[in-house]
Amino acid sequence: MTLALLGGKPVRPNPYPPHITTGKEDMEITMEVMREGILSDFEGSNNQWFLGGKYVKMAEKEWAAYFGAKHCISMNSATSGLYAAVGAAGVGPGDEVITSPWTMTATAAAIVVNNAVPIFADIDPETFCLLPDDVERKITPRTKAIMPVHIYGHPADMDGIMALAKKHKLVVIEDAAQSTGIRYKGKMTGCIGHMGIHSLNCHKLIQTGEGGMVFTDDDDLAQRLQLIRNHAEAVVGTGMAVKSLVNMVGWNYRMNEVEAAISMTQLRKLKTLQEERYLLADHITSGIKKFKGLLTPTIREGCEHTYYRYAVRLDPAAVPITAHTLVEALNAEGLDWYAGYKPLNLFPVYQEQIAFGDKGCPFKCPLYKGKPDYSLDSLPNVRRHLKYSFSTENVRPPLTIADMDLMLEGFDKVYKNMDKLVEWEKRNMKPGNK
């Protein structure tokens, strides 16, 4: 069969259906809130409405119980949760926070927003998560926190990271946006570090449209998170006592009552939705393993995986083309994979070191004495994955086993035309991807 890339008929002629997690129960609770008529019940003052309305409080209680955390603080997005958590940790001008470059922009932006400097460490060659050994190499007297990311839905090495944090007296903030509902050695991700953030964005495993949840077992951090969420400076000005005014400027990161209500009905179906992903992932894994040189997702001992994204690595000794070329061919067949991930250290804000104003803050702030390296020189695994990894979101409901079989048919078609793809790559691939 002729590859669609070369003019043939695609394996999948129709686009994938959207990932919809909402249903009757979400509609019913939304109407319950609408009938009551109070869509938000926060006030930015030191009074009985400081912590929000009925559904916000109910949701935070239910989520805390489900995850086994002492405190759950709802936010209007996981991005807001990250910003608030870095602020609550006391991070500020002159500080560094070590995180992964293989993540969404908000992870590092949360550091910059708090006037600190992100330092990017290398990633594990199999899980794509932050590598503790490289984190330790990059700790300096300026380091204030570590932000591991459970990327694609596999937990980072939290034992290694927590050991480093204890040794160097650092705060650990888990970016668990893609790992909601899974465990690392018996404990829920997002509940292992000092704070952890889950996402309820419309693309995630469960969703409220936008929204996020922050977990902590620390009473002081919980109060600081609540303050930053709700106009901290105004609240403190009306009489709430705080141990420190650091980062108590205050934002509006408040979740509304509709989102809070839906978060509860979504949480109750999380396990079912995850089980559906497992069935699809197991099926596609068993099929992809039959193709020489394709390495399916690793799941480390004691870990679970959400398969928020299903990531495949190429063995260049067995596959004579790059991931970019393979993805070009697969996508021409209608299969929607992605290669060419751009790590955060290569984004203009870090390459040019310009964020606030035109003076180079926070990177060139007089209080900052470091010289961050935003090249790929110290990130060999990142460099390799740029060329030899690719991923898809389409191993999730409402897709079926039949959709997975169609995907495998596309892989089979591409592999049978590998010699033609080698020639196509020579003619067409951009120099930076070779």
Image (cartoon, helix red, strand yellow):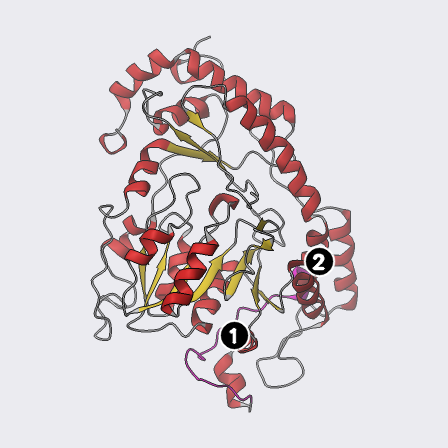
Choose top left, top right, bottom left or bottom right for residue 18. top right
Per the image, the residue denoted by label 2 is 264
- Residue 307 at what x, y percent from top left? 55, 40
Q: Tell me if 84 is positioned left or right of 17 in this view.
A: left
What residue is drawn where x is 67% and y is 48%?
270
Q: Residue at x 28, y 31 (%)?
A: 433
- Eyeballing the image, is 366 above or below 8? below
* Highlighted magenta segment, given as a residue range: 240-259
Between 58 and 336, which is closer to the camera in this rendering?
58
Q: Secondary structure at mark 2?
A: helix
Whether residue 249 is visible here, answered yes or no, is: yes
Residue for point 34% across, 11% down:
419
Query: As displayed, is residue 187 above or below residue 385?
Result: below
The percent coordinates of residue 89 (x first, y second) are 44, 72
- Sooner in the amino-acid sequence: mark 2 or mark 1: 1
Q: Position of residue 414 (x, y in %)?
A: 43, 16
In this view, the residue farthest toward the bottom is 239
Q: Are marks 2 and 1 in contact (CB under 8 Å)?
A: no
Q: Which mark is residue 118?
A: none
Q: Is residue 397 visible?
A: no
Magenta stretch encompasses residue 245: yes
In this view, the residue in front, 218 or 264, is: 218
- Identity, as a three-letter code, of the amino acid under mark 2: Met
User: How many other residues sit within 10 Å of disc 2, few (<14), some (14-19) or many (≥20)?
Assistant: many
| Three-letter residue code for mark 1 | Leu
Query: Is disc 1 surrounded by few (<14), some (14 to 19) or many (20+) residues within 10 Å?
Result: many
> Is 377 situated left or right of 226 in this image?
left
Observer-nearest residue: 377 or 192?
A: 192
Position of 220 with respect to 40 (left or right) is left
Q: Which residue is mark 1?
A: 221
**Could you tell me what secondary structure mostly forms the magenta stretch?**
loop
